[in-house]
Amino acid sequence: MRSWLLMAALAVAACSGPQLGAPPPELPTPDALVASIVRPVVQTLQGTARLEAYADGQRRSATMLVVASRPTSLQLQALTPTLDLVALTNCDGDRFLTFERGGDACYVGKACPRNLARVLPLPLPVEGLVAALLGDLPLLPAPPEHRKVAWDEEKSLYRLDLGAPTALHQQVYVDPKTRSVAGAVWHFAAERLASLQYDGGSTAGLPRTLRVKTTRPVIDLTLELRDVTADGKVDASVFAVTCPDGMRTVDLPCDSE
């Protein structure tokens, strides 16, 4: 009898308790949701990260040295297990530069989205890319008629739709409790372009893990921040990188060129 009563009590509790994925009593308006989003205020990042990437049919991994400074400065160094330099990518806000150690070419161009996609393949300008790395995902500007809020039952998150469905538009996912951004998906018309997901809580006020996926080309990469410092002083000279002696310089054009 006690066993039967216990099972009945558990069944009643399960039926009467909150249901996973159930929508909140009332959805906020788009303006209210945007105004309530909690944004990280970290200005700089320095430290090491672990990169796991699948691209071109191959899986690669590397220890990374990452330095970022708002609004537009970013540097990533791929290192060997003994912390020797393998490759470097640098952006000082205007100029983009990348090379591999031992290679014969150093690639240089403007800090446009096409070139920045070599760092994180997201449809963002340089200030947006730096902000996204710091957990402060930029929102796509959109007029009121192209801003909507829905409840994603599977994710148990608010979904903020921004932009016209026939052009570039963005779906931003927001935690209903913390009002922090959990990630976003970019589309152009019906085509899915890329997604960004923040995982694993935070470290030093920064997202612990960033996962980026694209469809053309197929890329799946995870950047896990490990030993990092937030808001430390970063001298601008860190980003004053030039091509190593003996390497030929190759221009990297932007789409408009």
Image (cartoon, helix red, strand yellow):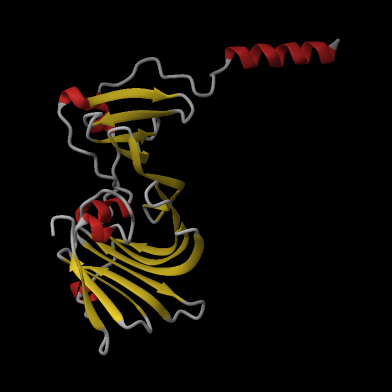
Q: Nearer the viewer, residue 154 or 19?
A: 154
State which quarter of the image contains the C terminus: bottom left
Q: Is residue 158 above or below residue 101?
A: above
Residue 18 in the image, given as x and y percentages of width and height: 53, 19
Q: Is residue 214 above or below residue 53?
A: above
Q: Is residue 174 above or below residue 74?
A: above
Q: Is residue 187 above or below residue 62?
A: above
The image quarter containing residue 113 is bottom left
Q: Nearer the viewer, residue 157 or 141?
A: 141
Q: Is residue 55 visible?
A: yes
The total number of labels drawn is 0
Q: Residue, x 64% and y 15% (percent of image)? A: 13
Residue 235 in the image, given as x and y percentages of width and height: 21, 73
Residue 136 in the image, given as x and y percentages of width and height: 29, 47
Q: Tell me if 221 is positioned left or right of 66 in this view.
A: right
Q: Residue, x 43% and y 81% (percent of image)? A: 84
Q: Nearer the viewer, residue 128 or 96?
A: 96
Q: Residue, x 46% and y 69% (percent of image)? A: 63
Q: Is residue 241 visible?
A: no
Residue 165 in the image, given as x and y percentages of width and height: 25, 29
The image quarter containing residue 109 is bottom left
Q: Residue, x 48% and y 19% (percent of image)? A: 22
The image quarter containing residue 151 is top left
